[in-house]
Image: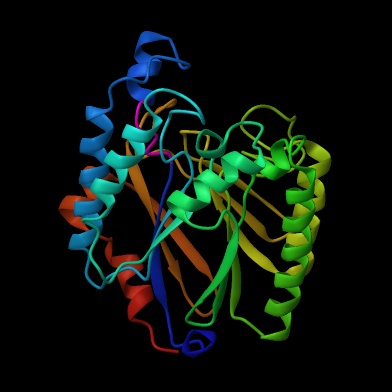
Amino acid sequence: GDEYQWKGPFYFIQGADPQFGLMKAWAVGDTNNGDDEWVEEIKLAQQAVQAINKLNPKPKFFVLCGDLIHGMPGTQWRKDQERDLKNVLKDTHQDIPLVFVSGNHDIGNTPTRETIEHYCSNWGDDYFSFWVGGVFFLVLNSQLYFDSSKCPELKQAQDAWLSEQLAIAEQQKCKHIIAFQHIPLFLRKPDEDHDYFNLEKSVRQELMEKFHKAGVKAVFSGHCHRNAGGSYEGLEMVVSSAIGCQLGEDTHGLRVVVVTDKKIAHRYYSLDELGSQGIEHELLAMLAEHN
């Protein structure tokens, strides 16, 4: 109950797409079967955990926005990839809770009840909400918005739940509402064409309107393996590049997100930069402000 109250600025860490197995698969040009090695990804995930553990003050939580591993449901290396990622993540400092978001590789491009149940038994619920210091956070299963053809009843259930949660947030007079999902609503512009890396236009429009009406300030996602983002009617869409394989010019990294009374400020850091220098003075100064 204590977390319903605003107690001053805080920050959290957002990461995305550790995706154990993609770097080898991408290098050999076989994204279906080439994911039989993930030594590089293990090192990068370890570097991310070490960088986060060194931070002072500690982040309120570390959220991973999907594609935890590369192996799709039913593929050969999936179990080993899940095991190795868990082994790395268990070294996260005990005072830093982990928050998991389901991605398309975690539950399949066209999820089923079975693939979602498997994910939930491994990583926790596929959608849920939580409070931190007067701020309301939503974790969504974006695959249900991408293709719910094999489990339409699960999409309906998430939709009903989301409407209910947004009504609760309004009632509780929360300071901010922030959402996490794997697939971005859009990459640059709210009306851009639909492709693999964003949501279909009509679905996107409906979600953006719902978020806008409820006063959601920001949506954080991954999936693109590049940094991107834009805004819609005061709703900021933040797309973070990967801890693992890069598909653009960005470095392996993490996003530091500072939440103050008035705004949500964030910056993407390379793993090297965050591990060696920590958070820049400007963000630390925002954390030090007392309302």
The reply, left or right, for residue 277 in relation to residue 197 is left
Q: Nearer the viewer, residue 79 or 231?
A: 79
Identified at 72% across, 43% down, the residue is: 145
Percent across and percent down for residue 130 are 54, 72
Residue at image point 42% right, 41% down: 68
Point out residue 95 in the picture as x, y percentages from the top left corner.
27, 72
Instruction: Judge whether 12 appears above or below 111 on screen.
Output: below
* The quadrant where residue 251 appears: top left
At x 58% / y 33%, what residue is drawn?
108
- Residue 259 location (% of width, % of height): 47, 71
Q: Is residue 111 shown in magenta? A: no
The one nearer the camera, 146 or 173, is 146
In the picture provided, is 177 more to the left or to the right than 20?
right
Magenta extent: 17-21
Residue 138 can be seen, yes or no? no
User: Is 107 above or below relative to 236?
Assistant: above
